[in-house]
């Protein structure tokens, strides 16, 4: 049997931010990104453990470094958290644990770290993410936006919150030791983010995943902006229920394009970028807007391989095995000679990276593509992704807020066919593979398809049908 | 006004709007990265810090991904002007004549930069010189501003004497400057040359240079300081520079063994190996064993023929879907004769511009390069790797390593049952 390896060593990312430097924001975002690209990641927030231990938060006194009782509680919380980290990385097949901490101590040496590293996870890589800020405006903005809604401050008014929080910061300052690349910490692997991304110091990146994390952190920003996602207008193929292909807009689709133009104008968006795929229907939609747009081949709809330009009824009749397999495992299922949702996510990664870099963007794409992008922004699992609702003639307006993304659904009143297929209720005893914590390796995986993976020619332009199945596929021997 | 009609470009199969029968503007093709205004990359560092190595490599990478880039080595301008190099004394800080000539060369190079970026449709220019004083960098930055270029500095800082000595041996001893000297004489002179710069060297500073965009590479990539990345292309450059290394290693490229469809002269598909193909796989296993390669990684595509080839090696391997052969769309599994018969226009178009030609419902070499970029990035990160792939894919990878332009890429020779062993040396 073929063997593939991609033994990504488990990684512990330690976020050592000062409070109100965006630690939780960055860790959630990073975790969301890593999970989306297929690397199981989980956040272990010491603040949450601490809040469990100390039910009611009295004041910043808890964080004074000379408060012995508090220090004990915090130490215990750290230990519990590290036990959970161990369990996640060892038993639950997690790949990356993100630990939010206030100090690097205990993560590179000491009894706790030793137990992690030497006893059970000898190949554990530790990567530090530190955020430092010397711009007071940035700090103040961050406190107001995020901390006011923190569980620590349920019923206080803004000034008290600010005041208390600033005092909390002062407590940390007494013991806080920033990473020192020139001396003490020169052998650690870390990235130091300065002034929310204005400057970065990167030290000793050890492997692929750390390099991706660095690249990601260097591309995200915190400027307010809006992302609009929508599909092309209804197409000729949509009308007849055919999937894929490269058809043009139907009359209603053209109407939608006009309505979209009006909507965009009303929104009065500053410096809006418009992206389309390289398929006719998205380009036609963009053309109606009368603005410059950029075509991305990687925004093209999922390649349905031999099933291109067929209706679901035709697929079920012609390839019943494929049809059934797809409903079982829609995320991993790859069309013969085509792609899977998992392939699509890999293909779309540069789009996500560029969306992170950009400001206001409108992405006119396709159903499967839009589902993948939406899953990234709304942190949807691989299991939910292929069933996200992305109807025609509907715009999703995404605005980043605090720790997540606000979604507004705007239906432009132009009728269209419904292209959504619900997940059929199957009685299966085992959970689908995409739900089990199997390690999703970076490039290798077994695509879910019937044995027949022969790539067949597609004679669309000649109008002939795909060839019949050529029989069972010989084994790899 | 009604939306414009679309027409499909017959070569690239892309949809373009047209007005009165002529292609109109308004849409842009996202190749891999769009540069809105030209970028001037300015190298900074003492001699023998790898500036030229980085310049050449970066230029090669950017050109491969489709960003027209050119490097301008001021040392070369100096060699063209001052026919015979005498000694390090040319570089003494109080050598008036030397200073005059060096400034002249820098200006001549900048002039050529301007021509390349503003007149010849270049997107990126790499200005390769020591640029070790703030004053010199200020001059160049102003030049960039005047011409509407974005300036990005790349500094290489290294104090490890072993690294510097190794650099000198690799690239300086063979330089035209030292053609008549013994190795010892050359080394001694070069070390004195470095000294000439040291006193006036002003490294990029976190406070003083906080408004500049730059990356400072320390100790050949142990750590990096990155400041104010302005746009997409700078972000890509930073990512690339952070992934390359100089550890000696070899990259082996080969195709799968001969396949059943190869025997029939058919392209594409997902066939298995022929009898001879299986033999090749066995020979490959033997060859790899003999080479005794340390920690070899083996990569294949997700097509049967490369996987079968790897299987014969008996070692773990990694499958990459992006290493799959070029998608020939409607022409999959046809012979070239059948293509010519059924799609004569397509057949002719492909010969006209093989790099940009996209099969109907398929891909072009240009698409392939974009798809393969993560492979190149990971190859840069890795050390010893064997990539078992396909003809078109191998051509793209080879073009990257050997700096072959787009016109030559689709015609590079990559026969079956042949392994290409690539070892980085000096600047290539």
Image (cartoon, rainbow, N blue to C red):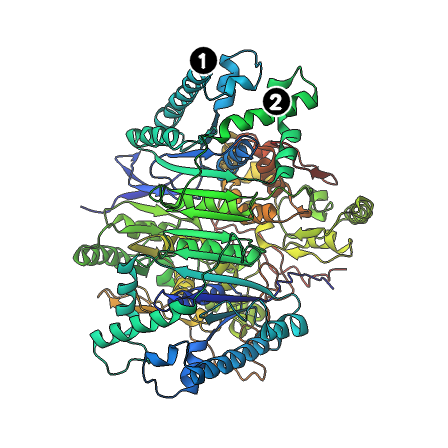
Total labels drawn: 2
| Residue A393 visible here | no
Question: Badge 2: how crowded within 10 Å, few (<14), some, or many (20+)?
Answer: some
Where in the figure is residue B264, as x and y percent of width and height? 70, 43
| Residue A27 visible here | yes
How far separated are the C-alphas under marks 2 and 1?
19 Å
Q: In this rendering, would B145 be left or right of A302?
A: left
Where in the figure is residue B87, as x and y percent of width and height? 58, 16
Q: Residue furthest front?
A: A66
In the picture of the structure, the residue carrying the numbered disc 1 is: B97
Q: What label sits on residue B189 in the rendered view?
A: 2
The residue drawn where x is 47% and y is 28% is: B129
Location of residue A391 (image quadrant) = bottom left
Label whose residue precedes the other's in the sequence (2 or 1): 1
The image shows residue B377, relative to residue A79, as above or below, that is above
Q: What label sits on residue A287 in the rendered view?
A: none
Mark 2 touches mark 1? (CB < 8 Å): no
Where in the figure is residue B292, as x and y percent of width and height? 80, 47
Question: Badge 1: how crowded within 10 Å, few (<14), some, or many (20+)?
Answer: few
**Which element is circle 1 on?**
helix
Where in the figure is residue A86, as x and y percent of width and height? 59, 76
> Is B7 or A127 nearer to us in this picture?
A127
Tell which subunit mark 2 falls on: B
Which quadrant would the C terminus of chain B be assigned to in this image? top right
Q: In this rendering, would B269 be left or right of B156?
A: right
The residue drawn where x is 74% and y is 64% is: A1
**Which element is circle 2 on?**
helix
The image shows residue A96, relative to residue A271, as above or below, that is below
> Is A129 or B334 nearer to us in this picture?
A129
């Amino acid at each position: 049997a073929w063997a593939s390896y991609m033994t990504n060593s488990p990684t512990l990312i330690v976020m050592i931010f000062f409070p109100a430097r965006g630690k939780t924001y960055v860790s959630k975002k990073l975790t969301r990104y890593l999970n989306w690209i297929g690397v199981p990641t989980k956040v272990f927030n010491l603040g949450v453990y601490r809040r469990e231990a100390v039910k009611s938060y009295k004041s910043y006194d808890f964080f004074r470094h000379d408060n012995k009782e508090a220090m004990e509680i915090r130490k215990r919380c750290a230990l519990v958290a590290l036990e959970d980290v161990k369990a996640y990385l060892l038993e639950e097949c997690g790949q990356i644990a993100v630990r939010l901490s206030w100090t690097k101590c205990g993560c590179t040496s000491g009894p706790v770290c030793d137990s992690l590293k030497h006893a059970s996870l000898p190949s554990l890589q530790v990567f530090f993410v530190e955020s430092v800020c010397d711009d007071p405006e940035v700090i103040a903005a961050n406190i107001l936006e995020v901390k006011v809604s923190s569980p620590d401050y349920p019923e206080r008014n803004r000034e008290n919150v600010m005041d208390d929080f600033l005092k909390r910061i002062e407590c940390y300052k007494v013991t806080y030791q920033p990473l020192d690349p020139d001396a003490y910490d020169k052998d650690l692997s870390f990235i130091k983010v300065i002034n929310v991304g204005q400057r970065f110091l990167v030290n000793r990146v050890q492997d692929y995943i750390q390099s991706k994390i660095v690249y990601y952190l260097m591309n995200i920003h915190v400027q307010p902006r809006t992302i609009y996602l929508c599909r092309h207008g209804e197409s000729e193929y949509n009308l007849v229920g055919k999937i894929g292909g490269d058809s043009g807009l139907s009359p209603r689709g053209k109407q939608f394009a006009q309505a979209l133009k009006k909507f965009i104008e009303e929104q009065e968006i500053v410096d809006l970028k418009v992206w389309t795929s390289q398929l006719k229907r998205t380009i036609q939609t963009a053309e109606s807007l009368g603005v410059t747009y950029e075509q991305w081949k990687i925004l093209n709809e999922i390649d349905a391989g031999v099933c291109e330009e067929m209706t679901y009824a035709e697929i079920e009749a012609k390839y019943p095995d494929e049809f059934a397999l797809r409903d079982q495992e829609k995320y991993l299922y790859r069309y013969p000679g085509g792609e899977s949702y998992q392939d699509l996510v890999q293909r779309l990664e540069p789009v996500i990276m560029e969306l992170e870099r950009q400001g206001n963007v409108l992405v006119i794409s396709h159903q499967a593509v839009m589902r993948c992008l939406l899953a990234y922004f709304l942190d949807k699992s691989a299991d939910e992704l292929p069933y996200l609702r992305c109807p025609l003639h509907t715009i999703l307006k995404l605005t980043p807020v605090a720790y997540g993304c606000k979604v507004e659904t705007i239906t432009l009143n132009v009728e269209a066919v419904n292209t959504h297929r619900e997940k059929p209720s199957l009685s299966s005893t085992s959970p689908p593979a995409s739900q089990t914590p199997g390690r999703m390796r970076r490039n290798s995986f077994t695509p879910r398809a019937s044995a027949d993976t022969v790539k067949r020619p597609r004679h669309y332009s000649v109008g002939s049908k795909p060839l019949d199945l050529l029989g069972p596929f010989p084994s790899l021997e | 006004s009604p939306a414009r009609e679309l027409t499909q470009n017959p070569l690239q199969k892309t949809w373009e709007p047209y007005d009165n029968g002529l292609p109109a503007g308004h849409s842009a093709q996202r190749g891999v990265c769009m540069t809105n205004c030209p970028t001037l990359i300015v190298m900074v560092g003492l001699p023998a810090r790898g500036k030229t190595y980085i310049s050449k490599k970066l230029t090669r990478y950017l050109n491969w991904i489709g960003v027209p880039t050119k490097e301008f080595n001021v040392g070369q301008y100096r060699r063209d002007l001052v026919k015979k190099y005498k000694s390090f004394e040319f570089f003494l800080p109080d050598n008036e004549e030397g200073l005059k000539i060096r400034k002249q060369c820098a200006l001549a190079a900048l002039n050529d930069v301007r021509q390349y970026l503003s007149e010849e449709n270049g997107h990126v220019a790499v200005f390769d010189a020591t640029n070790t004083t703030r004053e010199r960098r200020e001059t160049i930055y102003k030049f960039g501003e005047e011409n509407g270029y974005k300036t990005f500095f790349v500094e290489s800082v290294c104090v490890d004497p072993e690294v510097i000595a190794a650099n000198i041996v690799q690239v300086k001893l063979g330089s035209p400057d030292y053609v008549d000297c013994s190795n010892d004489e050359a080394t001694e002179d070069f070390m004195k040359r470095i000294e000439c710069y040291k006193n006036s060297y002003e490294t990029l500073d976190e406070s003083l240079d906080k408004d500049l965009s730059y990356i400072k590479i320390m100790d050949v990539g142990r750590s990096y300081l990155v400041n104010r990345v302005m746009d997409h292309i700078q972000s890509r450059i930073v990512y690339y520079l952070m992934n390359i290394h100089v550890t000696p290693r070899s990259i082996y490229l080969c195709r799968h063994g001969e396949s059943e469809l190869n025997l029939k002269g058919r392209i594409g598909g997902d066939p298995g190996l022929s009898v001879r193909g299986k033999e090749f796989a066995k020979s490959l296993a033997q060859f790899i064993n003999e080479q005794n390669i340390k920690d070899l990684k083996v990569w294949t595509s997700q097509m049967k023929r490369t996987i079968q080839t790897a299987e014969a090696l008996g070692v773990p391997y990694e499958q990459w879907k992006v290493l799959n052969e070029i998608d020939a769309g409607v022409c999959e599994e046809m012979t070239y004769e059948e293509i010519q018969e059924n799609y004569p226009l397509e057949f002719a178009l492909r010969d006209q511009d093989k790099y940009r030609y996209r099969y109907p419902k398929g891909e072009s070499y240009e698409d392939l390069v974009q798809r393969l970029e993560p492979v190149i990035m990971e190859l840069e990160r890795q050390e010893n790797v064997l990539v078992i792939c396909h003809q078109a894919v191998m051509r793209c990878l080879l073009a990257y390593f050997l700096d072959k332009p787009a016109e030559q890429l689709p015609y590079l020779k990559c026969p079956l049952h042949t392994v290409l062993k690539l070892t980085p040396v000096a600047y290539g």
